[in-house]
Image: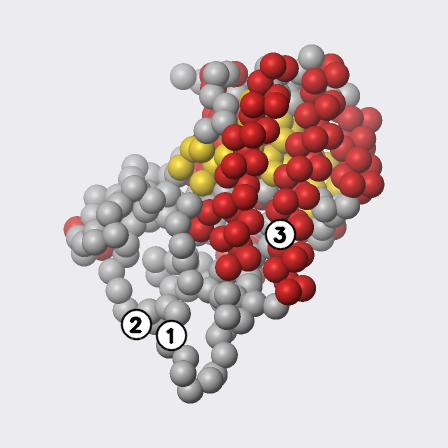
Amino acid sequence: MEVSLEGKVALVTGAGPNIGSGIALALARYGAKVACVDLDAEAAEAAAERVARNGGEAIALAGDVADEEQVRDYIQQVIDRYGRIDVLINNAAMLGGKGVLDENTEFFRRAVEVAGLGNFLNTKHVGRHMAERGIRGSIVAISSSNGWSGTAGVIAYAFHKGGVNNFVRAAAMDLAPYGIRVNSFTPTAPTPDNPALIAERGPGGVLERPRANGIGGETGDEPWRRPSRWSGERAPMVPMGTTGTPTDIGHSVAWLCSDQARLITGQDLVVDGGARAKNFAYAPAAPYELAGPPPLIPLDVTGELDQTL
């Protein structure tokens, strides 16, 4: 089956530099023209430049997904440039944060606002654009394994990702009469494969070492404290031995946005090496005993990638 997004225009929020950039690149490599939106103008530009280096077409737009005026503005810029929007990827979210005993109100409010209003406003206004023009489009919200199960140290992230999951199901019901599909996609802590990101922060992912800029933060130092996370060595707890990469996510999201998936709506697609499916008492084989998945099919041909991930 050959997946094609030729003739389609996609808008990706939260476009840099890890999952969002990977999805933008994949959509472009499968034929779509892509608008890369991020609060950070430089991140949006970097995502668009990565698409261009790999032979695709993309534009960079800066905007706050939680500000309705800005959302309207960048959506209109995409329409003015390309005439239509067929695909919306709601990826913008706030990482970081702390556990329920330590999180502050300001961060919690902003994290929920970005996810809640970000998904709502972009889905509303892109959905109206699609419905008014008879575009049978695809909207995908990026969820997380933290939206389906509990993890210490990420209370705001867990709360808003859980909200994303049911927003998708409800929005799918609202937009089904227009032939517009709404789904979610659940990854879990992918190993970065963006050459620029690796050059900046170093290689590796959650199976090799925790990333310094990952989710979760320090707890307090009161004498009654108990640790929220195990910090010693442990075997990889992902059945296939890897959580995958943004390229793995990109391939799957591109298929979910294609006409081959025309009857899939209100669903969640999980690409996590079996992490969510396992029993809590799962006892993995040693890393060297795992066959792992087939070699990665690369999308970024402009940098050094580890094809064994």
Q: Inspect the image, locate mark 2, and give the three-letter code of the amino acid beneath it.
A: Gly
Question: What residue is rendered at 46% in x and 64% in y?
Answer: 153
Work out whether 118 lies above or below 268: below
Work out whether 198 lies above or below 148: below
Label 3 SS? helix
User: Which residue matches tag 3?
Assistant: 112
Please tell me whether mark 2 or mark 1 is closer to you in this view: 1
Quote the CA–CA distance across marks 2 and 3: 32 Å
Where residue 3 appears, x then y in whole percent?
48, 20
Q: Quadrant of residue 291?
A: top left
First in sequence, mark 2 or 1: give its number: 1
Q: Nearer the viewer, residue 17 or 199?
A: 17
Work out whether 211 lies above or below 116: below
Q: Nearer the viewer, residue 45 or 103?
A: 103
Asked if one can make out residue 166 in the rendered structure from this viewpoint, the answer is yes
Q: Is residue 301 left or right of residue 240?
A: right
User: Which residue matches tag 2?
Assistant: 232
Q: Quadrant of residue 88?
A: top right
Q: Inspect the image, locate mark 3, and give the three-letter code of the amino acid beneath it.
A: Val
